[in-house]
Amino acid sequence: MQNNVLILDFGSQYTQLIARRVRELNIFCEIKPYNKPPEDLSKYKAVILSGSPFSVRADDAPHPDLSEIRGKKPLLAVCYGAQYLAHFGGGNVAPSNTREYGRANLSYLKPDELFFESISEGSQVWMSHSDTIQKLPDGAQVLASTHDVENAAYKIENEITYAIQFHPEVYHSKDGKQLLENFLVKIAGLEQTWTPDAFVDITVAELKKKIGSEKVILGLSGGVDSTVAAVLLHKAIGKNLHCIFVNNGLLRKNEFSEVLEQYEDMGLNVKGVDASARFLDALKGESDPEKKRKIIGRVFIEVFDDEAHLVEDAKWLAQGTIYPDVIESVSATGGPSATIKSHHNVGGLPDFMKLKVVEPLKMLFKDEVRRVGRSMAIGDERLGRHPFPGPGLAIRILGDITAEKVAILQEVDYIFIKGLRDWGLYDQVWQAGAMLLPVNSVGVMGDERTYEKCVALRAVESTDGMTADWVNLPYEFLQKTSNDIINKVPGVNRVVYDISSKPPATIEWE
């Protein structure tokens, strides 16, 4: 990680997209909250300030101390960041006459400006702000304008400080990636060396140094994240890795036996533990989704504690935590962004469990995990598996959990997922699953009136789960799937298809 970029998060919904765009340039970056920046800034070669829902004119606006950054490191200020530098640097920020939101086009570019190299006048950018910079800060010169925004981009003389009032990280800014490359590579001088192969080499070396000859227990789920984490750890510590696959009673149909079979040829030391009755007993009568997650997390840890005592001298618990888990669980690593939901595998272990935690993937997005897996020659069949939530079907059964409900949803899910494979649609979908709703509806089967369960099918396309769009599955497929579910799954008489995107909805219903 020789070319780190620090992204200070001011609460923008786009902050994670900045990180993704930077990493697409093969440059490593980290998101930190503006109010909790790293104490040691020496490892960072450049800094980016994110946007924010706040106005710089508000009394409670984020007001970071940039004294160790301004003029000392290359700095790119995006949207709120640009207004912040202006407002507190001798310029003037005022409410815009009209809210500047949506597509705009660059109508002026300063000639021969490296920041805009390979970008032409007329290039589309994305605006999202209600304030505007009327007067630039001291020592600044304008670099770009749009029809409505005179100071769309500027730089500070005698510093490597650039600022823009649009968002280069979003898809609608057509040359946004080029702009970030111009700043980070051509201006800041960072090398594009953060590749999957480099990540593997660095991470394996770090794991060897951190773990040494101590034993590690890993919760293996059969999913992409835990598989890649297992192979990384196996490269680093070999036989000292002890993998455990827990059946929490909330897995997909036949998944416990199938996953154990899949790993037989990978050289991993895997043990299967059937704790389904233990989980279902603990969940009995609980309907609150957050409490269900916490119960599953607690029992998960209890099971691992039991198993850890069977592995002599085990010192570590490994987890397949990835970056979106961390961001959603702790509000963008402790910053101002809103917490969406908790994750059972994030946040450490209770005091009674005497294991240290190692999370080799916690700085990777899902697509990066897959690329790392391919670099280690893990097969596409495993890497192409849809994500499946750690709490399993518990958060796809709205309301309380019973063995009967789990059995119903397992059958529905099996028909849906098998249908996607049979129709050649599985690889066009990022994640799919079925939800058992806490409502009954009237139906007619033959000459009889029924009053049975309703299920919702969900299929989304995404890159890393931070944003997602519903997949427009063929009507013929949905028709056949609905018929198969209603005809083959006792207790279900209605099937609906979820056409909500994230945001505003989440991918899972709980």
Image: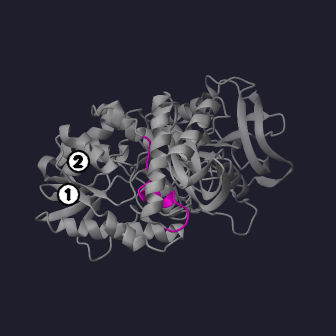
Q: Which residue is drawn at 31% across and 57% down?
A: 247
Q: In the rendered view, does 338 fall on the left or right side of 79?
A: left
Residue 79 spot, x, y in % from top left: 68, 48
Is disc 2 placed on a helix, strand or loop?
Answer: helix
**Left/right of residue 484 with respect to residue 299 in the rendered view:** right
CB contact under 8 Å: marks 1 and 2: yes
Residue 216: assigned label = 1
The answer to which quarter of the image holds residue 114 is top right
Q: Magenta residues?
A: 386-400
65 lies above or below 201: below
Q: Residue at x 69, y 58 (%)?
A: 88
Considering depth in this image, is 21 or 277 the residue closer to the camera? 277
Q: What residue type is labelled 2?
A: Leu
Which residue is located at x 80 percent, y 39 percent? 150
| Residue 258 is at least partly visible in this image | yes
On-image quarter of the C terminus: bottom right
Q: Which of 139 and 87 is in front in this view?
A: 87
Q: Which residue is drawn at 18% across and 54% down?
A: 242
* 480 left or right, relative to 151: left
Taken as a whole, is the magenta stretch helix, strand or loop?
A: loop
Q: Which mark is residue 233?
A: 2
Q: Is residue 91 magenta?
A: no
Image quarter where the N terminus lies is: top left
